Image (cartoon, rainbow, N blue to C red):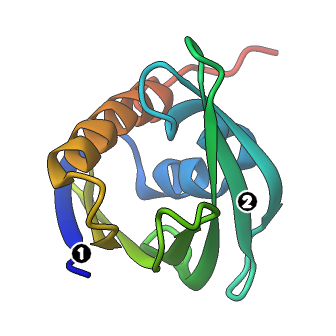
Amino acid sequence: MPTGTVQLHRVLRAPPERIYKAFTDKGALERWLPPYGFIGTIHAMDVRVGGGYQMSFTNFGSASSHSFSAEYVELVPHKRIQHIDRFDSKHLPGEMMVSIDLKAVSCGTDVRIVQEGIPSVIPEEMCYLGWQESLEQLARLVEPDIPEHE
């Protein structure tokens, strides 16, 4: 069964530490990862190699939901995250490898994401669209530099 690959590249006005935190913090991931129109819920999370998270996306309009698990295979703080994703549905078989690379640049962080092994029933353009929406929400979360007030 053929599978798809998507590659995304963004430069965000935020330090790698803040972006890494957004990929490994339960509340942050629930907020920015679901594409528009979906609510994300992380049911369990263990941020370590061999650990991972179990997450569901619920369509706000129809209340239908799908879930998946992510298993961390590489965690290099502020530089790289790699995980294997598996959908819980038998209709979406196989494993997807997601690689996130973060590199500090003069204006923030160069973010490169590769998702490989997308089930053939999911059109690649839908994955691109979903990732674009998620990354826009990520930027809105990590780019504001809000001063601390005591």
Instruction: Return the x and y of residue 7 as percentages of the image width and height.
Output: 17, 62
- Quadrant in which the C terminus is drawn: top right
Out of 50 and 35, give the one closest to the viewer: 35
Labels in figure, total: 2
Query: Residue 136, relative to residue 82: is it above or below?
Result: above
Left or right, residue 20 beside residue 56: left
Left or right, residue 86 beside residue 131: right
What residue is pinned by disc 2? 54
Instruction: Return the x and y of residue 109 as percentages of the image width and height.
Output: 29, 53
The residue at the point 52 percent across, 56 percent down is: 17
Which three-letter amino acid code belongs to the residue tagged 1?
A: Thr
Which three-letter amino acid code belongs to the residue tagged 2?
A: Gln
Instruction: Identify the element where label 2 is drawn.
Output: strand
Residue 6 falls in image quadrant: bottom left
Q: Of the residues tagged 2 and 1, which is closer to the observer? A: 1
The residue at the point 63 percent across, 77 percent down is: 71
Query: Residue 60, relative to residue 100: is it above or below?
Result: above
Work out how far the residue at label 2 is from the one at label 1, CA to CA, in angstroms: 22 Å
Query: Residue 7, relative to residue 63: is it above or below?
Result: below
Instruction: Identify the element where label 1 is drawn.
Output: loop
Instruction: Return the x and y of residue 2 as percentages of the image width and height.
Output: 20, 79
Out of 14 and 26, give the one closest to the viewer: 26
The residue at the point 31 percent across, 44 percent down is: 131
The residue at the point 62 percent across, 29 percent down is: 64
> Which of the two discs, 2 and 1, labels the residue nearer the N terminus?
1
What residue is pinned by disc 1? 3
User: Could you classify mark 2 by the number of other residues whose Cα lies within 10 Å: few (under 14), some (14-19), or many (20 or more)?
Assistant: some
The mark found on residue 90 in the picture is none
Out of 121 and 56, give the one closest to the viewer: 121
